[in-house]
Image (spheres, helix red, strand yellow):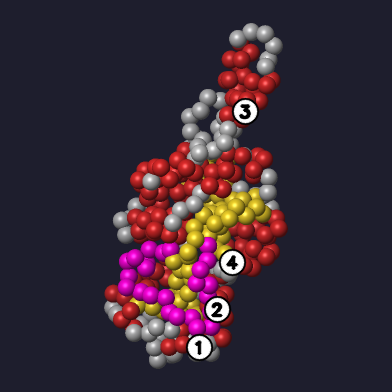
Amino acid sequence: MLYRHYGKKALLPLSITALLLTACGGEEDTSSEADASEIYEPNGAEIELTYVAWESELASTNVIGKVLAEAGYDVTLTVVEQAPMWASVASGGADGFVGAWLPSDMEAEYEEYGDDVVDLGANLEGNRTGLAAPNYMNIDSIEDLTPDVVGEITGIDAGAGIMLSTEEVVEEYNLDISVTTSSDAAMTAYLDTAIENEEPVVVTGWQPHWKFNTYDIEFLDDPLGIYEEEEEIRTIVREGLKEDHPHAYQILDQFYWEPEDMNEVMLDIAENEMEPDEAAQKWIDENRDQVDEWLDIDE
């Protein structure tokens, strides 16, 4: 599914450069052509990034997509499910993604595809997953969950790492409560309605996510330590990207920001009703020095 297609930056095409070199007289200078090719490597080069339709990844992928477009790449953002996101990069069908929640949330995919991709390391640290509930429910721990407290746990898409952990939570804590699958958007919509009516509600949660800024909700304590309290989001690219598109590889490698940065973009999308690309551009414009560091590539 094609999510968004960014245009190419206006650069002098290599073919025109070659013609000018030839027209200046004498034999064609192949060394000059090689230099020009290196300088204008992004011109016309296509980069495809995949991502899962979580609001956190909607923010990060649109930001880095616009940054790559600014560098001269023709960028396609493609929405997929979690496992196909990894499989597409491992097979070389897509160039990369910036939404690898590790070490636990996407542990299964990392074990399956990790040897066939390039792990560029964290682009965000200090993120967390778990179960969350509004403060008006006056519960502090997963151990407090009973059918009298809440009828179900509202989750996201089946197969997501947080859903697998939640199934383990239900089993290990002997919770007589069902887990309902939905989507990030559906889950937050359900949370919004429940909070508006002050109804009991427990959802799968992860931070950064704009709902922790908007609603008075907290993570429930997890005495058994099934959810990871300190995770990171990593950038994963296909093998061969460094050789094929060294500038894109370096930009992706240098992409790093803080949870509050991601939350700013998510809040503009969720609360200020901005389009994702508009919110991404706003953040880029307001954080020019940081973006310029990502774009500081070796020639």
Check residue 226 in the rendering and tell me which mark sits there, or answer none.
2
Residue sitting farthest toward the bottom: 148
Earlier-in-chain disc, 2 versus 1: 1
Earlier-in-chain disc, 1 versus 4: 4
Q: Nearer the viewer, residue 240 or 185?
A: 240
Earlier-in-chain disc, 3 versus 4: 3
Neighbourhood count class around disc 4 (C-alpha, 10 Å): few under 14, some 14–19, many 20 upward: some
Earlier-in-chain disc, 1 versus 3: 3
Residue 121 forms part of the magenta stretch:
no
**Horizontal and vertical percent position of residue 162:** 53, 72
Name the amino acid type tagged 3: Ser
Q: CA distance from mark 1 to mark 3?
A: 61 Å
Mark 3 lies on residue: 37
Q: Are marks 3 and 4 in contact (CB under 8 Å)?
A: no
Earlier-in-chain disc, 2 versus 3: 3
Q: Are marks 2 and 4 in contact (CB under 8 Å)?
A: no
Mark 1 lies on residue: 175
- Give the extent of the magenta segment: 208-232
